[in-house]
Image: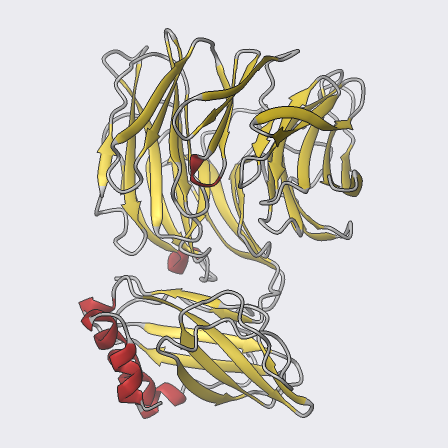
Amino acid sequence: MSQAALLQAAAGKRMVLVWALLIAAASNPGSRSGFRSGFQGLDDPFAKGLRWEAGASQVEPWIPLGVSFAAGGELVLVAAGVGSPHLQLASASAFDPAGAMLEALQEPAALSSSMDVVSGESSERMFALFQFPAPSPLQRRTEIRAYRASSGLGAELWSHDPGPIGNTKARLTCDANGQGLLLALETDAGVQLQWLHEDTGNVTEEILLPAFPLNAVCTSMGARRVAVIAGSQLWVLNELAEVVHHENLAFASSALALDSQGETLAVGAFGSLRVLCEFSGAYLECNEILGGRSELPTKLALSDNGERLAVGWWDFAGGVNARGEFWDLAGTTRLAEINQPGVAGGLQNFPIAARVTPDGARAAFGFWGGNASHELLLVDAGGQVVLSADLAGSVQALDLDATGTRLIVGAKDGHANQFSTTGKVLQFDTGERDVQVQAVPQAGGLLELVAKRSDSLFGVYLLGSEVQGLPPVPGWGGLPMLDPFQPLFTFARSADAEGVVHLPLPLPDDPSLTGFAFQAQVLFAMPAGLHFSTDLARVLILP
């Protein structure tokens, strides 16, 4: 099909214009001059380790209270609280804090210590929760704000004030698509749940649960199911705010997780965690994982299908011992275990975060740390530690991207038991993705794509739109992942001696490019034949 025919097949005039601009940029001879052999001392995107870190100062102190991946894992949203409260928007593709930090939105009004962010990793939707001291310093007013990744933090889409004022906590959650947005807010009468429309902030459903405090809340995809622990009671509700399950728990646990369909629920108990499965609309216990007699599960996470589970255990008897476990619930098999024994009288260790990839291949854990323990660990289903880091302080917030190759961590500069008003955000990468965006793609800047396969002679970059379920191409390795019925553009580049294929594309300084998203796959040519890249690079052009 000719280039003109492909452009005509694109949906809408804007897409036609954007692709035309990109083709013109790629056709410029200057776009081929950026080839380099190896990385020659430059930061290697295929190496494992710390990508960047950005920290607070004594002049402008802050501690990261929430972190979340957005825009296909290419952007990071950070809630920085305490001394100088603000939101940060950062790039997951950069190698230095100056290049990573795209934008900061300072909050002029004084904030309480409660602040958080959530976002749909596979979408551009980003949400922030703020609590302000109002009408007095002893009370809190809650506010939710929405943003779009490509528009940045300066263009607020909507804000929502839920109404009740108190001196208690609030939680915000959404699914991977940035939908199923739910606010849980403590009030004097109990826990208020509000289902919010992600595009407008309007309340679509609402219910008051007559118990408090709010200990945990989680949602399935689209908030088809919502699970809440308030006091020592567990509720499960449907998308119409109807209670489908309610029970009294042995204690007020903060450990709670739902799978993406809301069919599997994990909840903490004394020395164990219970797994409930939905049968004909009722939740019945279908499994149990035992811990130590003096252990409590503090954090739980489930894979999308509910078959893989991560759990953080805390030994409350001494307070210094902690563990992380990764389980296959289908066979009730422990896949990986992390032991962090402490020293009697030493600093308290505590599992503060647990994450599982949607496919259940990997799990990540964040700890307060103690006795020279690593505070960050990423493990796989084979029981191997993929990545670990000994941080300067305690983990406060953690997120793991859908590929299980990128982690964003918010940490204090000291231990959680010690006074500190500063912290930092750190981004780690396993370097395993075989095609990546190497720098922040901005209109008027340079889009840099890099791919690597050790035995490749050259590579053909394919730029287009992702699609699921394509069959393999006979005689070629790997699977195609771009829609052949949508515009698809190809750029061939030679590989260097290490098999690295580099594609620099100068981006015109044109406003129509902002917010344009596409995916890149590489077809590697090797002596043995052709092979598609295992991964996709996800590109979102920013202003």
* Residue 457 visible somewhere in the drawing: yes
Report the residue that reaches farthest toward the front: 280
Say left or right for 190 vs 158.
right
User: Where's residue 527, x and y in %?
Assistant: 67, 92
Q: Quadrant of residue 135?
A: top left
Of 211 and 433, which appears nearest the observer?
211
Picture residue at 52% right of the left edge, 78% below the top: 522
Count of labels in the image: 0
User: Where's residue 213, x and y in %?
Assistant: 48, 12
* Residue 57 visible somewhere in the drawing: no
Of 243 and 253, which appears nearest the observer?
243
Query: According to the image, what is the colour scheme of the structure?
Result: secondary structure
Relative vertical location of residue 215 with respect to residue 508 in this rendering, above or below: above
Say left or right for 224 vs 266.
left
Picture residue at 54% right of the left edge, 76% below the top: 451
Picture residue at 25% right of the left edge, 11% below the top: 136
Which quadrant of the figure contains the C terminus? bottom left
Which quadrant of the figure contains the N terminus? bottom left
Relative vertical location of residue 59 with respect to residue 483 in this rendering, above or below: above
Q: Quadrant of residue 99?
A: bottom left
User: Where's residue 9, x and y in %?
Assistant: 29, 78
Q: Quadrant of residue 13?
A: bottom left
Relative vertical location of residue 493 with respect to residue 9 in this rendering, above or below: below
User: Where's residue 234, x and y in %?
Assistant: 55, 17
Say left or right for 274 vs 254.
right
